[in-house]
Structure formats: structure tokens, C-alpha cells
Amino acid sequence: MAGKPTLHYFNGRGRMECIRWLLAAAGVEFEEKFIEKPEDLDKLKNDGSLMFQQVPMVEIDGMKLVQTRAILNYIATKYNLYGKDMKERALIDMYSEGVADLGEMIMHFPLCPPAEKDAKLTLIREKTTNRYLPAFENVLKSHGQDYLVGNKLSRADIHLVELLYYVEELDPQAFGQLPSAEGPKSQSQQSPGREEISAAWQPEEASHG
């Protein structure tokens, strides 16, 4: 029997967080080995565990996977969160990439120089309320279902729910303007990993590294 996936990353959200969410939504228990000092990262590099000398890295099914999208694609495929055919996977990829675009902006916000924070926050709010979340709102309204693709939970829903929590944390008013987006959020609470998702979400101010 295969062991639990092991996640190698820093003790923060960063690029590992979406992987944690996807595993939790699939009801998969995992272990984490945090990189707490430079020597920890050097060890992973020196023993050949990091193909491109960077994390995140996930040990799963006898592999040491790197590159966030590759890891997400594998997990989504393995746990049936990636659609039933090529067309559904294309939509899931398209929606997931849109989520990632806004997510990158939010993830890097805490790292902005203080003098740039107000302008950056204004830009994030503008793109959130006028571009990204309305696009997902329109998708949900167009078919009247609770999930983005195929009326079934997919990685796109999980990524969107994670993004909604970030948006709500950063600007509660922005989320309140998009009622249809509550569908994926509420449905995620019925996924196999709903308890893990709720437990994993802990607001933080500056660990989006």
C-alpha cells in the first residue's frame, strides 16, 4: 500500500497551498516536511530530489514531482478532479489559469514595498471586481449549475474556492458582490476533504511567499 504523499516546502502558503487544497478536497491525507533552514533546501538539491533546484516538491506514488502545474495535474487526474474528456479538461485548465493569474497578484501583495501597497491593492481590487470574478460569475450563471465544469467537482472549483477565501481575506466587499460564486464555495464544503479544508484555512498576513 502506497504511503501518504509528502510535501516539501516552506512553512507558509506560497505555491504549495493550492496543492494542499487539492489533496484536502480529494480527502487525501498527506505529510509535510518544512524547509526551515538553508541546509534543508541544500540537502534536497544535493540528493537529486529537485529536478530544477526549487520547490514545491511532492513525493507521491514513488515519484518526486516538481513544478506546481505538473503536480496539480497529476493529483487532479489521480483523484478524478480533471473532467471526463479533453473538452472538459480544456475548460478546467482555462478556468484554473484564470484563477492563477489573480492568485499570483494576491500572493505577491505582502511582498510589495510599503510605498506601493495602496496602488497594488487598488489594482487587485479592480481586476477582482471587473475582470476575474465576474468571468466566473458568468460561467456559473450560463449553465445554472453548482460546479464550473460538467456539473461535477473539479480542480477548477477547488482553485476558485481557494481564491475566494484569499479575496475575502483581502477585501470582504469584493466577494459580496458576486453571489453566484457561493455555489463552488458551498459545494466544496461537501467534498470528501471538507473538514481538512476548513481546518487548513487559517488567515495569515504575510506568508504568501
Image (tube, rainbow, N blue to C red):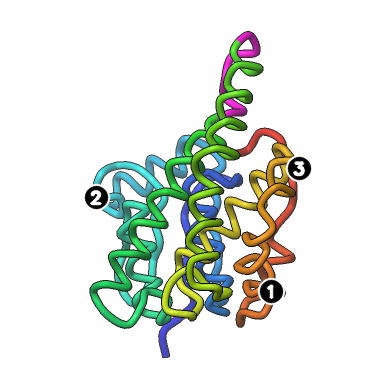
Percent from the top left, x then y, of residue 148?
A: 48, 68
Which of the labelled discs sits on residue 189, or is there none?
1
- Of residue 23 and residue 143, the one placed in the foreground of this image is 143
The residue under label 1 is which amino acid type? Gln
Marks 3 and 1, the one that precedes in the sequence: 3
The residue under label 3 is which amino acid type? Pro
Marks 3 and 2, the one that precedes in the sequence: 2
Q: Residue furthest front?
A: 142
Give the residue pinned by disc 2. Answer: 51
Give the residue pinned by disc 3. Answer: 172
- The answer for how far apart the CA atoms under marks 1 and 2 are is 35 Å
- Of residue 137 and residue 41, the one placed in the foreground of this image is 137
Marks 1 and 2, the one that precedes in the sequence: 2
Disc 3 on helix, strand or loop? Answer: helix
Q: Residue furthest top?
A: 115
Q: Residue furthest bottom?
A: 1
Quarter of the image with the N terminus in it: bottom left
Disc 1 on helix, strand or loop? Answer: loop
**Left or right of 116: which side holds 105?**
left
Residue bounds of the magenta highlight: 109-115
- The answer for how far apart the CA atoms under marks 3 and 2 are is 39 Å
Disc 2 on helix, strand or loop? Answer: loop
- Tell me if residue 195 comes above or below residue 202 in the rendering: below
